[in-house]
């Protein structure tokens, strides 16, 4: 260990469990030079907010005790100078660190520091124990805690534990952690070995909780880099803290390409609906072309917001795109404009205003035109096979787009030997398609026509 390195061993008491909605009520800092404690600091803090009764019972810190205590802003300068240039050490380090980063920032101090977690270090240097909570590991190591759940009592115990870690660190775990400092960015329950398994290739990553339940699915062009980015920075919201604390294991699946990663991510989200995947509305279309029959018996076409209609003909991302599609149908098939409804925010798919009967086309002729439109749209459905690189040199990825719908995607070897597309489609590769997945495939196909094998439609085969 570098003899010049100084450590700020810290413990705080707070009004709650996450920095975004809670405040500090007490702070204690011990400066350790790698051999002994050389400086001490302790202060109660007026949080300027109520202290929940359960917290009062746990810590013994009551509103009366902090009423005349300084606010954090009043001690921020002292805290900043004590921490600046030191390695930040705490038991479950990200908890204390997140509070102090937030409080110092609010006081006008932009502070960051390398971190060491005595929970993680204890697991490595003193392996084999059932629990590594401060109370339990101190009991095993015969460290006396004079005032549990008070900042100075806990920080003195943490400092003694840290001293023992320094003495018994035969494999130089502390030095390794300081050099990389990746491990101490990870959630407490996630091991460095889990993280190091992750490849630096495209694919999806799956966060699971301690029970093995999938809680989040993401995609990446570099899985390891993307996963680590989740744990960078300081986001003090309760939802963010719950998300990080829930992560216990990480699985991954390589994809070969970013497009395949996108499809794999969507498929897994739709299958499991993980609790922390919030942005799911993007997978649904915004507008639809619908068909219905009015009270006069006329077949009507209308653009509407997507809202659970059962008679949808085609989906669209924007109202402009949808209106243009209907306008092209009017021009191509000479449809009567008064029997079609374009989307307008003020007149969305409402029954047209009173139409003089004499201005309407023949009922039979109009309905025949609409039937012809349906037939033509069916004939124009696209089918193609998109071939791209796979996860290694021996395989390729494929995407099968069948009759205007994403039908299957997966990986196959010897793709050049196929004669019928069904030869390469595995039952496991068939997918639950949606509008978003179909759109990203079509957009990719438009940008990369050289990767497309056009297939005949069902109508052409028959």
Image: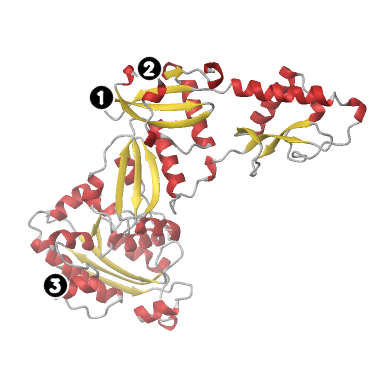
Residue 171 percent coordinates (x, y): 9, 54
Report crowding for label 3: few under 14, some 14 to 19, many 20 or more residues within 10 A (C-alpha).
few
User: Label 2 to label 3, Cα distance in Å?
Assistant: 69 Å
Given contact means CB atoms under 8 Å apart, are the residues at marks 2 and 1 in contact? no
> Relative to the observer, which residue lies in front, 442 or 404?
404
Disc 2 element: loop
Above or below for 237 versus 254: below
Q: Nearer the viewer, mark 2 or mark 3?
A: 2
Above or below for 300 versus 44: above
Above or below for 40 versus 227: below
Q: Which residue is located at x 50 percent, y 17 percent?
A: 456
The answer, for residue 93, to whether it is visible in the render is yes
> Relative to the observer, which residue lies in front, 125 or 278?
278
The residue beneath circle 2 is 419
Q: Which residue is located at x 65 percent, y 44 percent?
A: 307
Which image quadrant for residue 367?
Answer: top right
Earlier residue among tags 2 and 1: 1
Residue 133 percent coordinates (x, y): 24, 69
Earlier residue among tags 1 and 3: 3
Q: Quadrant of the C terminus?
A: top right
The residue beneath circle 3 is 141
Residue farthest toward the bottom in the current orientation of the protein: 64
Q: Nearer the viewer, mark 2 or mark 1?
A: 2
Q: Which residue is located at x 40 percent, y 38 percent?
A: 264
> Relative to the observer, which residue lies in front, 262 or 242?
262
User: Label 1 to label 3, Cα distance in Å?
Assistant: 54 Å
Give the label on residue 382, or none.
Answer: none
């Amino acid at each position: 260990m570098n003899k010049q390195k100084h450590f700020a061993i810290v413990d705080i008491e707070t009004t709650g469990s996450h920095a975004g909605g809670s405040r500090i009520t007490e702070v204690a800092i011990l400066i350790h030079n790698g051999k002994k404690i050389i400086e001490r600091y302790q202060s109660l803090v007026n949080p300027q907010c109520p202290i929940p009764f359960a917290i009062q019972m746990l810590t013994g810190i009551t509103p009366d005790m902090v009423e005349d205590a300084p606010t954090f802003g009043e001690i921020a300068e002292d805290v900043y100078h004590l921490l600046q240039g030191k390695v930040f050490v705490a038991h479950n380090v990200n908890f204390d660190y997140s509070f102090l980063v937030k409080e110092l920032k609010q006081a006008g101090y932009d502070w960051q520091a390398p971190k060491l977690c005595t929970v993680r270090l204890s697991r490595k240097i003193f392996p084999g124990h059932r629990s590594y909570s401060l109370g339990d590991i101190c009991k095993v190591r015969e460290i006396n805690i004079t005032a549990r759940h008070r900042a100075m009592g806990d920080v003195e115990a943490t400092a003694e534990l840290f001293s023992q870690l320094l003495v018994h660190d035969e494999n130089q775990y502390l030095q390794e952690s300081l050099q990389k400092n990746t491990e101490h960015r990870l959630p407490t329950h996630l091991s460095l070995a889990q993280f190091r398994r992750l490849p630096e290739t495209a694919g999806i990553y799956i966060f699971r909780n301690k029970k093995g339940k999938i809680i989040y699915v993401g995609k990446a062009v570099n899985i390891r880099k993307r996963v680590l980015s989740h744990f960078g920075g300081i986001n003090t919201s309760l939802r963010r803290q719950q998300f990080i604390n829930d992560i216990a294991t990480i699985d991954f699946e390589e994809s070969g390409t970013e497009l395949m990663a996108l499809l794999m991510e969507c498929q897994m989200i739709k299958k499991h609906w993980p609790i922390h995947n919030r942005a799911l509305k993007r997978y649904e279309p915004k507008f639809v072309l619908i068909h219905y029959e009015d009270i006069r018996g006329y077949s009507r076409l209308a653009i509407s917001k997507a809202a659970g209609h059962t008679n949808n003909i085609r989906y669209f991302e924007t109202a402009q795109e949808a209106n243009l599609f209907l306008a092209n149908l009017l021009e191509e098939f000479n449809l009567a404009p008064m029997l079609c409804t374009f989307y307008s925010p003020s007149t969305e798919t409402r029954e047209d205003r009173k139409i003089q009967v004499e201005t309407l086309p023949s009922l039979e002729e109009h309905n025949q035109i609409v039937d012809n439109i349906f037939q033509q749209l069916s004939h124009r459905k696209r089918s193609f096979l998109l071939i791209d690189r796979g996860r290694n040199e021996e395989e390729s990825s494929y995407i099968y787009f069948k009759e205007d719908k994403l039908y299957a995607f997966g990986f196959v070897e010897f793709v050049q030997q196929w004669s019928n597309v069904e030869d390469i489609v595995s039952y496991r590769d068939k997918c639950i398609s949606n509008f978003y997945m179909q759109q990203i495939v079509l957009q990719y196909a438009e940008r990369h026509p050289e990767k497309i094998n056009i297939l005949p439609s069902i109508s052409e085969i028959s």
